Amino acid sequence: MLNAKALKFSSLASLVAAGALLGVACTADVTGKAPGSGQNGSTGGSNSIAGGGAGPVGGSSDFASPPKVPGAPAVEGAGTLPLLRLTHREYSNTMAELLGDTTNPGATFEPDSPGVAGYQAPGTVATETARGYMTAAETLAATAITSKKLAIPCTAPADAAAEKTCVTSLVQDFGAKAYRRALVQGEIDDLVALFQKAKTLGFNFQDAVTHTVEAMLQSPNLLYHWEIADKPLVHDKDNAALVALTPDQLASRLSYFLWESPPDAALQMAAAAGQLATADGLKAQAVRLLADDTRARRALFNFHRQWLHVDNLEDLDPGTDLGLQLGQELENFVASVFVAGDGTLKSLLTAPYTFANASTAPEYGLTANGSGFTQVQLDPSQRLGVLMQVPFLRTNGIAPPVRRGLVVYKQLLCGDVPAPPPNVPKPEPDSPSTTTRERFSKHAEQECATGCHALFDPWGFAFENFDPLGHYRTQENGQTVDASGLAQLNGVVGGTTPKQVVVPFKNGLELVNALAASDEVSWCASRHWSRYMLGRLEGDADAGAMTNAYVSAAYQADRSTTRPFSVKDFLVSIVGTKAFRFRTPAAGETL
Amino acid sequence: MTDTQAEQRKAEQKSVLNAVLGEIQSLNVKLSKTDKDKLDEYATNLRAVEDSLDNIGTGRVCEKPMRPEASEALNQERGVTPTTIVQKHTEVLVELMALAFTCDITRCITFMLGNGTSNNDYQFLIGSSTPHHGTSHHQENAGKLTSLTKIDTWEIQQIANLLGKLDASTDADGQTVLDNTTFYMSSDIADGNTHNHYDMPILMAGRAGGKLNVDGAHVNYTPALKFPRPLIGERSDVHTGRALVSVLQAHGIMQDTFGEATGGPLPELMNI
């Protein structure tokens, strides 16, 4: 049968008891550390995976502790690069850059989910995704050509030969932007043939051009990051196992890393002129890209919203766009720190200001006019840095000690969290006579919850001066809020010998200051940025590059005097390493 | 869009997809197994999209529908007492299901109106708050029975609405979409008041492309039972299982048993 469809429609009254317990849960078999837990937290746990290639470099590929006592630069390697599809955000940004489209077409696709590294890394394409690409391509191509945002380089060509010249020119020019490289002759021929096929089907010139553009918008050359499998093959002179990315690939990798968008004309020209062949050339472009406020903020926001679990903004406050406004607040804040500001992790974690507009200012008890965001000072005796701003506090406002604590423990300290066992009881429900901390402390004392909640809840208690909505409070249900604790950190800036340091804190303000001064947090941040850049977990092959980039961002030029960790410098440095400029070919790849 | 234009468009879409498939082909030879699999997946699903262009019914042009008006209303209702949410959800989903089959977006749909102890509120039918679960425990209360009848009737009306839409759509082979569909409706329980699992209500429709014969007949497989039904009665799960075996066989899955039911398909349902 052509069509055999089955439909099952189940309805009517029913009384079958069914229940599902939900809860964050844990096992007792854990390693790690927690504030005040008294455990020896010497191993935060390594998430490294075998990356293939160079093996341990730089002394140690144990990622658990920051690199120690910098001496000579580590030997750099490079791991494999998985073939990755553009995330839907990258897709939307790409359409914005190519076609001037601002409709965020990627938002209509099945949402991306986090990859193994914790950052969006789309996997395979389902039928609906393929159909989505097709439908989006049809709309986008038609709109761009009708509106002339994508200009056809000729008007009313006289004959078939003139048409062919015109379409060839469009395919070459638009293709170079869309595919992020020059098209080869066979590709140009195929696309021109597609145009001619459309003409034979009876479409007029403009529609036939539109259909040709449709094909390019669905092309795997556009939809995937092609940092692999290209010629000519150039090996690293120090390590023949490593293959150099081509200039075009480097330009694309760089711009999607720092802009979440395709290369601009200047970057493509730099690639063509051979300026990306050296580490310094690449770093110079990285500096330029990071200074572009409109595009760098895309990637900066995208990283931080995932790193700090500022998730599900669209659904944060149903019926309003407050969630999206809070997203813009975060975007403005990270842009101010990393594009215009000093680019340090300390500023991210302790800056006493944020950005607000008329919708978001009341969340801070402030007022502002209009929809545009302006910088507002926050009371430094209440709030410091990104972890005490409403976007983070509110998106992690359900079971707040757990979620906020998890971000500190797992994302800022790179601590291991064991998988939850079944049947973990839920914390007691809200009651008018207890504080959140009391309820969750009790939960953490329960047998099956002690193994893990004790690891991360105490960090979350530091933010108890903020209710689930992120509003400041000193009292909860008639009791004074207790946001104190002990932070067990792995050495601090200023010391060259890692040691267990227990830092008592009275409240979240003292905790974020301690975190900002911890080299463990700096190192963890650089690990997360590395994962974001690589599209996979960091591995042994990346350790040397990560170490060198970290040292250049955490130490003065003498490589021994520490300085506040500069994320911006880390990003520029890592781009110049072999882990960015080279790759280890995957097994089975035909070179 | 006229039929000629639609045909022209379809031909063009296919040549565009073929061009994309050609590009995938040329990239694929260079890749490692893992990466090749990723790209193959895109190719496979592009072909599925291409195939589906051939299977779209001719009765309507399967362009992406407008966003249903109801969904905006639903958005506004989020977080508010959902007095009409069941009604609006169902209307939208019935529309979507009919469209999905007509346009061959999918070949299989399961739709559950409410979960086991659903307290969907039928205030929009009854006038006052009427949660389904509590109402189904009617204990012969006349008011509750009246409400339950209204709820059941409304539910069956939604089904009639869906089947009507499928019957009004023409499939690619010229048959109605309903003719090429197997529709199976049941509940997880026969009588909510007593929780019995015999005497299960089953409604079937559609002809599975001619393989099933389910139109028009009401078959009682427990004729010996008189009203009021006893709490524990004759097992009808045997017949339920055999009805499901009939569906399997109509779809080319030549299995003879389902659950505890043996004896193969119910012969009166089969047209094979």
Image (cartoon, helix red, strand yellow):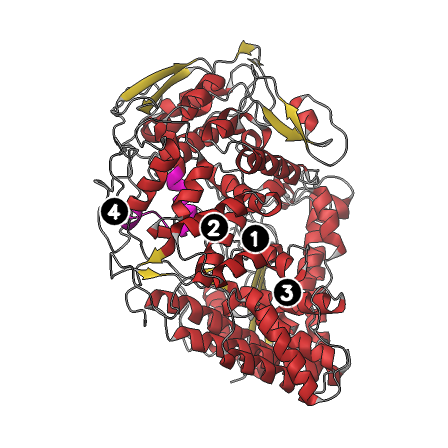
**Mark 2 touching mark 1, by CB under 8 A?**
yes
Image quarter for residue A496? top left
Label 4, secondary structure: give it. Answer: loop
Chain of residue at mark 1: A
Between B39 and A573, the one lying in front of the other is A573
Q: Which residue is mark 1?
A: A89
Q: Which mark is residue A136?
A: 3
Label 3, secondary structure: give it. Answer: helix
Q: Quadrant of the C terminus of chain A?
A: bottom left
The verdict on a common chain for dots 3 and 4 is yes
Label 2, secondary structure: give it. Answer: loop
Q: Earlier in the sequence, mark 1 or mark 3?
A: 1
Q: Which residue is mark 4?
A: A75
Query: Residues under labels 1 and 4: Cα distance?
Result: 35 Å
Query: Residues under labels 1 and 3: Cα distance?
Result: 14 Å
Q: Which mark is residue A578?
A: none
Image quarter for residue B108? bottom right
Q: Which residue is mark 2?
A: A120
Which residues, given as a range, are shown in magenta? A526-542
Can you give x and y, in whole percent of width and height, for residue A428 in the image? 48, 25
Of badges 3 and 4, the one in the foreground is 4
Chain of residue at mark 4: A
Residue found at x 35% / y 27%: A562
Query: Residues under labels 2 and 3: Cα distance?
Result: 21 Å
Is A176 magenta? The answer is: no
